[in-house]
């Protein structure tokens, strides 16, 4: 039985983004700080792109009207045969760029092919001092320990997480030393060295759980009746303390409410994450620089882009002259053609980058202007209750852009308003209907929840069920799980964890 195969040819229409469009999308999603760093990287990688110096702002930018001549010359060159190249290979160049040409260099435009937003996620560099673990090792070396104990200590410190807790069981640490350092130690050996490390600064480091962490910190304090009582509470009533069942503690300890309040206040002064106290605060603090500036003048809103730290770019004059030289040369050998290709690619890449920057400015301004117009009442008053429900699709429909573009504009961007600096994302919110059937923003409901919790009796904090009733009285029909969701978004703890004496 024979089978025959047939070849068929079909045509399909597919949308494919050009390298310039991909580059634009990547630039749109960058914040002002990230864009400044991206421009510096482009200047370093492309010698045809230069930053305008302060003393050059009064000089007109070099005009490059060479494209037509270059293209015509390029078309004429393409008609030459391979044999012609070989014959011309010995010709002398007036201008030799061989030292600047990388034979394996990929044309610039071919580098912009991956439209993956995560590829551009980068953190701004910060300087910092010694790390948390390095400081623990420094303290270890100052202790009079044997070589074996030093090795055990290094293994223990390597098993301490960034919060300061020991993340591995002592038995596992003993096994690690046997396999990695061929060092046979017992669990007691590990516990002995762990006891030494738990005396290090910051207090509480090396603890295996929160209870031990707090007790270690109390142990290093000056002992008095209050500290001793706090140790007893954490030792014998830690579960009741963590669940804030204060009435049970009072009943079992015969303490007065005021005495227990003083003990709890002392415990709350302790650090539940001792490793965090060693972090360089400056190195972990990012100053928010707004991408947009919104001002109000006589009830009229004005929008401006914050571009004051971004350099002004232009095409290198040297590369322009090189392109002019090679495009006008009548006789070209292989080396000339390679030089012309190199220079042309660099200039084209520089132009594409500059055009993408300009298009980025235009896109950001159009989108933010639409957001500002949509939320005009909010930006004029600063009242969260005036914030209308707004989705990405709402703005996309207004500006006739894709939702992904709106998302890129809102991502990692901040707007300075007369009432403070806010994330652009915070201006978007879902909607729900009140009893009158009016559409209201979820931000309005979150604002009401925040105000209710701020005014609540801390001895009897409002439960989620009670807040459902309060919202219902105000005309908002919300389920308990929705209240819990909004509370978590606002970073508010459950009622039992907000309880105070």
Image: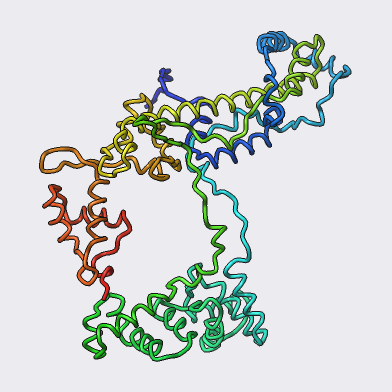
The single residue placed furthest to the front in the displayed view is 298
- The quadrant in which residue 310 appears is top right
What percent of the width, then of the height, locates residue 93? 86, 19
Q: Nearer the viewer, residue 452 or 212?
A: 452
Q: Nearer the viewer, residue 148 or 296?
A: 296
Give the side of residue 346 with respect to residue 257, left or right: right
- The quadrant in which residue 414 appears is top left
Which quarter of the figure is the N terminus placed in?
A: top left
How many numbered tags mark residues here?
0
Q: Nearer the viewer, residue 99 or 459?
A: 459
Colour logic: rainbow
Q: Nearer the viewer, residue 278 or 481?
A: 278
* Residue beneath the point at 56% across and 59% down: 282
What percent of the width, then of the height, locates residue 345? 67, 24
Give the side of residue 328 with respect to residue 192, left or right: right
* Residue beneath the point at 21% across and 41% down: 440
Which quarter of the figure is the C terminus placed in?
A: bottom left
- The quadrant in which residue 347 appears is top right
Q: Is residue 30 above or below residue 163?
A: above
What percent of the width, then of the height, locates residue 98? 81, 28
What percent of the width, then of the height, locates residue 391? 30, 36
Q: Is residue 160 above or below residue 26?
A: below
* Residue beneath the point at 23% across and 55% down: 449
* Residue beneath the point at 56% across and 75% down: 157
Give the side of residue 434 with respect to residue 256, left or right: left
Q: Is residue 400 above or below residue 34?
A: above
């Amino acid at each position: 039985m024979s089978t025959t195969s047939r070849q068929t040819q079909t045509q399909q229409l597919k949308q494919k983004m050009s390298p310039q469009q991909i580059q634009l999308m990547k630039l749109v999603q960058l914040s002002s700080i990230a864009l400044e760093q991206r421009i510096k990287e482009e200047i370093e990688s492309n010698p045809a792109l230069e930053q305008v110096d302060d003393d050059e702002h009064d000089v007109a930018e070099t005009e490059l009207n060479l494209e037509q001549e270059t293209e015509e010359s390029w078309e004429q060159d393409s008609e030459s045969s391979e044999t012609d190249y070989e014959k011309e290979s010995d010709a002398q160049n007036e201008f030799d760029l061989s030292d600047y040409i990388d034979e394996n260099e990929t044309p610039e435009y071919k580098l912009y092919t991956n439209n993956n937003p995560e590829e551009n996620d980068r953190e701004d560099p910060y300087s910092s001092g010694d790390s948390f673990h390095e400081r623990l090792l420094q303290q270890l070396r100052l202790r009079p320990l044997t070589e074996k104990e030093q090795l055990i200590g290094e293994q223990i410190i390597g098993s301490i997480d960034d919060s300061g807790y020991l993340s591995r069981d002592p038995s596992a640490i003993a096994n690690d030393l046997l396999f990695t350092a061929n060092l046979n130690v017992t669990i007691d050996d590990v516990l002995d060295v762990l006891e030494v490390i738990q005396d290090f600064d910051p207090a509480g480091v090396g603890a295996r759980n929160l209870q031990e962490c707090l007790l270690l910190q109390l142990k290093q304090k000056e002992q008095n009746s209050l500290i001793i009582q706090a140790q007893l509470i954490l030792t014998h009533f830690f579960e009741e303390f963590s669940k804030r069942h204060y009435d049970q503690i009072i009943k079992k300890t015969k303490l007065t409410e005021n005495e227990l309040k003083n003990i709890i206040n002392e415990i709350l002064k302790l650090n539940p994450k001792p490793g965090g106290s060693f972090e360089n605060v400056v190195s972990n603090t990012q100053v928010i620089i707004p991408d947009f500036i919104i001002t109000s003048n006589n009830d009229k809103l004005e929008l401006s882009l914050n571009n004051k730290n971004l350099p002004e770019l232009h095409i290198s004059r040297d590369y322009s002259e090189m392109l002019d030289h090679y495009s006008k040369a009548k006789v070209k050998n292989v080396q000339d053609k390679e030089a012309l290709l190199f220079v042309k690619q660099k200039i084209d890449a520089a132009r594409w980058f500059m055009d993408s920057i300009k298009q980025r400015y235009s896109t950001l301004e159009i989108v933010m202007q639409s957001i500002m117009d949509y939320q005009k009442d909010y930006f004029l008053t600063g009242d969260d209750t005036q914030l209308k429900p707004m989705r990405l699709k709402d703005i996309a429909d207004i500006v006739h852009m894709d939702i992904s573009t709106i998302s890129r504009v809102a991502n990692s961007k901040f707007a300075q308003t007369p009432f403070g600096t806010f994330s652009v994302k915070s201006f978007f919110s879902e909607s729900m209907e009140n009893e009158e059937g009016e559409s209201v923003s979820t931000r309005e409901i979150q604002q009401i929840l925040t105000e209710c919790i701020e005014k609540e009796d801390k001895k009897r904090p409002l439960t989620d069920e009670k807040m459902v009733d309060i919202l219902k009285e105000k005309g908002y029909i919300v389920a308990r799980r929705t209240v819990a969701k909004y509370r978590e978004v606002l970073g508010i703890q459950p009622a039992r964890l907000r309880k105070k004496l």
